[in-house]
Image: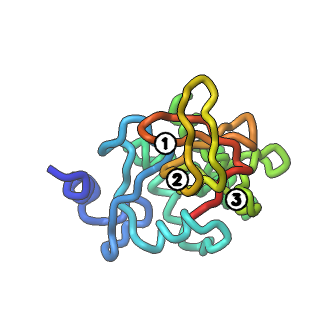
Amino acid sequence: MSIERELNKRSGSQCELCTATENLKVYTVLPTQRGGLDENIFACATCIDQIENPGNEDLNHWRCLNDSMWSEHTAVQVVAWRMLSRLRAAGWPQELLEQMYLDEDTLLWAQATGEGADDENKIIHRDSNGVILEHGDSVVLIKDLKVKGSSMVAKQGTAVRNIRLDHENAEYIEGKVDGQTIVIITQYVKKT
């Protein structure tokens, strides 16, 4: 059975965040470890658009998190925590966050994108043009790069998909080039 059909069945054909029944699709909660059903949710286009575009949030739309934050599904809990963290300045999201409990692994997953970190403590990764990079983005190398510890050279113009961010250094990202995971310095990439 496909992930979409399993999520449709699990959710009762509704958005697992706001219970909308139209324009539903699979949303992968990054960063993923194994893939599969446990790292995805079934969400409506409205929720996905607001998750992926910070600053576009309709605060009243997210009052639905009052119910969905108690979901038995970890991926739903992670998205609820991230959105409540993003919106916490409005007051009521902070109150809900204080009620929420996530085990240690789930909390680490929720924090992996930097959501909820204080702005002055948040590490921001930027490409060569100053564009902010996020987990799962695709980038292109703007220069030939010799990979340390191997004879491999990553060629200019190589696309690197589904990047991961280094949470300790704003200048490093990870991605796969020719099937090998390498660390790339952000000044040598351009977001696509």
Say what amino acid the circle numbered 2 marks.
Answer: Thr
Q: Residue 182 at what x, y percent from top left?
A: 56, 35
Label 3 Cα crowd, 10 Å radius (few <14 / some 14-19 / many 20+): few
Give the labeled residue for mark 3. Answer: 132
Q: Earlier in the sequence, mark 3 or mark 1?
A: 3
Spatial separation of the CA atoms under disc 3 and disc 1: 21 Å
Q: Nearer the viewer, residue 19 or 86?
A: 86
Which amino acid type is marked by label 3?
Ile
Numbered disc 3: secondary structure: strand
- Give the quadrant of the C terminus: bottom right
In percent of width and height, residue 131 lies at 71, 62
Residue 168 in the figure: left or right of residue 163: right
Labelled pair 2, 3 in contact (Cβ < 8 Å): no
Q: Is residue 48 left or right of residue 191?
A: left
Q: Are marks 1 and 2 in contact (CB under 8 Å)?
A: yes
Identify the residue at image location x=42%, y=37%. Answer: 179
Return the disc, 2 or 3, that comes first in the chain's sequence. Answer: 3
- Between the C-alphas of marks 1 and 2, the distance is 8 Å
User: What amino acid does circle 1 point to?
Assistant: Val
Q: Quadrant of residue 72?
A: top left
Residue holding disc 2? 158
| Res. 170 image quadrant | top right
- In the rendered view, tell whether residue 91 sits above or below residue 160: below
Q: What residue is shown with label 1?
A: 177
Secondary structure under the numbered disc 1 in the rendered image: strand
Instruction: State which mark lies toward you, 2 or 3.
Output: 2
